[in-house]
Image (tube, grey):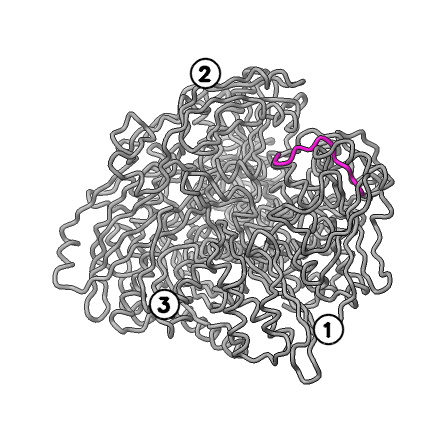
Amino acid sequence: MTSRPSHIGAHVARVEDDRLLSGGARFVADVSLPGMLDAAFYRSPLPHALIERVDTGEALQVPGVAGAFTADDMTDVSPFPDFHRTARPVSIFPLARGKVRYVGAPIAVVVAPDRYGAEDARDLVSVDLEPLDPVVSVDEALAAEAPLLYPEWPDNIVIRSAVTNPEAIAEFEGRMTVSGRYQVGRHAGVPMETRGVAAEYRDGRLTVWTSTQFPHIARTMLSYCLPLDETDIRVIAPDVGGGFGVKAEFYTEEVTIPWLAMRLGRPVRWIEDRREHLISACHARDLTLDLEVAVDGDGRFRAVRGMAIQDLGAAEMYPYGFSPAFAAVSHITGPYRIPHQSVGVIAVATNKTPCGAYRGFGIPEATFATERLMDKAADRLGIDRREIRRRNLIGRDDLPYRTSSGAIIDSGSHREAFEETVRLTSESLDRWRARLAGDPHLRLGSGVVSYIEGVTPSYYSTSGHWTSFDSCSVRMNPDGTAVVSVGVSTTGQGLESMLTSLAAEALGVGRHQVRVVMGDTDRTPYGLGSWGSRSTNVASGALREAADVVMEKATRIAAHLMEASPDDISVHDGRFGVRGTPGASVTWRDVATVANIRTTDLPEGVKPGMEATASYDPPGIEHHPDEYGRVNGCATYTNASHGAVVSVDVGTGKVRVLEYIVAHDCGTVINPQIVRGQVVGGIAQGIGGALLEKLHYDEWGNPMSTSLLDYHLPTATEIPNMVVRHFQSPAPAMPWGAKGAGEAGIIGPAPAIAAAIEEALSDLGVAEITRTPITAPHVLSLVTSSVSGGRQEDRGDHR
Amino acid sequence: MKPPPFKYARPESLDEVLGILSEHGGEARVLAGGQSLIPLLNFRLARPEVLVDIALVKELRRLAVERGVLRIGAAVTQNAVERSSDVARLCPLLKKALPFVGHLQNRMRGTVVGSIAHADPAAEVPAVTLALEATMVARSARGVREIPADRFFLGPFTTALAQDEILVEVRFPSSKKTRAAVAEVAPRSGDFAIAGVAGEVVTTRAGKVRDIALAMFGVGGSPQRLHEVEARLTGERVTDDLLDQVAALTRHTAQADSEDVHADAAYRARVSGELVRRAVREMTR
Amino acid sequence: MSVNGRPIELVLDARKLLVDVLREDLGLTGTHIGCEQGSCGACTVLVDGRPVRSCIMLGVQAEGCDVTTVEGITPEDGLNPMQQAFKDHHGLQCGFCTPGFLTTLAGVTPDAYPDEESVRELLSGNLCRCTGYEGILDAVLAAWGRDR
């Protein structure tokens, strides 16, 4: 049985667009239930303090207030289990118990008929806090006599993985070494829809609507924390307004709100406001890579060693916030032949908002460091910055290639994508030089970088619990239409459309005959959700296996109806035919009607019904690293090269990205428009992180970026036009040869833009750029210090 | 982020407005476009007892020219001012500055007078009033006061208005200057400026500066007029050398004491010189 | 006031934001809340034809006004040309910010934005975290009959 590829690679409209365009979508904030109450949290105003007393008496006097609660009231709630074997246990509890470790930590919750009243009551909660000395940086956290966030620990280290690989160390003898300390600032995903939870407890069952990337994991976690069996919990992720990793954490509010619904016997809703979002949804990055490379005289990298140092914030985040540091280590070589590595991890707790996931998940940090070191080594050796990369990039002849991080690269266009990007970037730079020649303030430059991105990763290192599989059910209705339900869920990437295409492809029906169901644990088989650029791989794998079962049966029925051999049956566009017999034909409706209704027409030995559920665990994923931290933690690896063309205003330090070039390879492209959207959207976030975005803290641990006026997301005027080229190197082991594309774009901009700025200012001999965001004051300080004092090392800071 | 409770009044006459302000003193706030005040309410950083909405007060909705003086009432939106041909003719600097104020959606409701009364140190319009030597007209139940722009701004978000006063109008005198420029550095378009300069100039037929006015914003706690820089330029032909001197003079004389997470004072001082250089060059080219 | 062409009479708490009136009292949930301080644009609606931020406008301030939301600019039988252009050019992903863009665009005249730079400036009052604005810009230029 075969069918012609007709939906893959085609430009097709998204099925989710009409409701999103017309105001007909349903986000959590749009869930409205009779008698529903709104909750508001009292959050810690201090970064580090003991809770002496919480008095909700006055809050309870506000008319209409249905309740005000603290941790002491949650006697039937269990803390999040601590799954990780080598990390110190944090024992997250929905409301703070005894102590707060960051500004924004929830201490109490009040419930009222609407959010206005809830905030009125919240303002009347009286909390006595005894301030403790705050720990605001890695250096402060590691200092002797540092205040302890968790007094039961001997220090503030959440996890440390010391790696000493003697083979790597030996490479440093007698070779030139280049080193640097590279810091990616504290960023966050900041989806346009904040978090939100609504819950109803009715007839012994709990229904929870939450803006999450993993409804099934949320259900399981709820069953761990609340006195309910998993079968009595239904989690629904309705339309989700962006996730980017922020919603691939399980948050305490996702327990508190359902608990309130059970306790009060009324539906309860909490919609996070933007201020809360910026201090209590997970932060990310804030990772320093302190690295040294051993380099041959011709520019070939031989080994890398050093540490990934992560400022985790208060560490009260699950899945674990330190996981990106490990992902950084496993991507530290990028697409380069660096035969040996020895890079450890240390993650420390500080009195800031806990870190968690954000698109890219450690890979942007690793790529920033490695690419900066490439540039630095090239400069040191007097080799062109493009040329040194040519000497190190893996080529097709090297494949499959196992990196010194353990990653197995089985396909890709590493050199081709790079050369295409170099060519396009150079043309772009020439174009812009001609266009802006008259402006005396501007200097132009370009930078080209490359990376690999492991997609469809093991979840074990991140969660300490879940691994990597996902599921799909395919059910044919009697009229020949299909219901495809999956364990992954969408946050706007277009998964509904992608799966519609694949299901139509696999089942030989039209796209309009497929309905994809996701984001509802009652209606979908178990799965781990959407993160790690995994959905395309795992959902398509499970879909194909389920569809194969359905198709085998359908083929037998069709053959029976046409009195032909199953081997000769083909299907296309809802119709089965017999190869070599042009006139013979039955429709999917005929076949599905027989399977579901007129079962007397079934061939002998074929059981009624027409549905199948399959689970798919991508092959090749390893869940446990070896003693040197090496692990093939991902199902497959995409590659890309990025080129940034920038202007630097030497009078103000203002950097403008003039054009951005990307050659991207995620294997088979199922929907080119969606892939391009993912890549371009990721680049835009990457540009934000490179130039604009930072979650600032003052020296006492107070958050200074608590609104979108202070946390600067890029607007349409900061994002340039982009040139996108798709290469397609199919993944041999993946269904349809596809590789996930969700995170790739965000990885390249920081190092590409840093290199471009340096190139623009090269005649000034400015210091190396070693941290993001690269703000206008920072760039101007590079310019002025170069004029006044010549080349200087850039001074980092940990804050 | 929802406003705390307050009493709301929407009188139709100015006298009623003044009466409420007089009765409640500091506990009443005037609501015009609300583009600054309502965010403050949402953050619960402002908790007025009474909000006095002036949208229905006819005499505050006037945008008029009388004897060459442009008069903008307290309820006139920035967008209306931006589109006014009178403003383009009489006050080109104001017209040039307004597109820098927030975004289109903000300017549809935000008012010019509101921006002045709010006195954000990084806002453009207050600096424009300084450069153009505008007059603020304040009213209270006690009477009328006219306050020149250079005595109006006292510090960040602090003005010479008394608690029972409302800024009913700003008056821009007719200017003999012919060219105007606004130069600013902001993290993104629509953001409050890290530093900026607004100015206008008239040159002689021989190309020398006859008269020039320059005002900075974002750099210090209040907008500041750059008198020394103006004096240095007056009577001179603008050359690159002179611009270098002027930039240095600005750096040294501008009161740069604003610091926030986006830029320190040193950056503001440094860039202020550069912005003055650019604004002056643009105007005298 | 009138909302999407229908007269509405409500007794409102003075502090209730227009966006909450639309969403909670009138069930028009297409208008979204993204920041509640007037900086993201997700809540943009038309008031007397002009795009404004409904999260920093009180419901009572809309008394006597004509308010139009994304539901009001959507034809009964499908999409308007700008909506269709967004769909054709992948001008949306999660769609949370999209109604704000659409209402802003419904409240301006294309002639005021003659080139790409001015269109970008216009769009800068609405934040989108998914698309990188490429598809949005493509959609606007296409709907306004311009070549990219």
Residue A689: x %, y % from top left: 46, 53
Residue, disc 2: A72
Q: Secondary structure at mark 2?
A: helix
- In this view, the residue in front, A795 or A15, is A795
In front: label 3 or label 1 = 1
Q: Work out whether mark 2 precedes mark 3 in sequence or the reverse, and give the earlier one.
A: 2
**Magenta stretch bounds:** B44-54
Q: CA distance from mark 3 to mark 1?
A: 41 Å
Report the magenta stretch's main SS. Answer: loop
Residue C116: x %, y % from top left: 64, 66
Q: CA distance from mark 2 to mark 3?
A: 57 Å
- Left or right of A121 in this view: B34: right
Residue A396 visible here:
no
- Marks 2 and 3 share the same chain: yes
Residue A239: x %, y % from top left: 58, 39
Q: Tell me which amino acid carries mark 2.
A: Asp
Magenta span contains residue A475: no
Residue C143 visible here:
yes
Q: Residue furthest bottom?
A: B206
Residue, disc 3: A766
- The answer to whether C63 is drawn above or below residue C80 in the figure is above
- The answer to whether A69 is drawn above or below residue A569 in the figure is above
The reply to whether dot 3 and dot 1 touch (C-beta < 8 Å) is no
The reply to whether dot 1 and dot 2 touch (C-beta < 8 Å) is no
What subunit carries mark 1? B
| Residue ID at (61%, 23%) | A121
- The answer to whether A91 is drawn above or below residue B74 in the figure is above
Residue, disc 1: B178
Q: Tell me which amino acid carries mark 1.
A: Thr
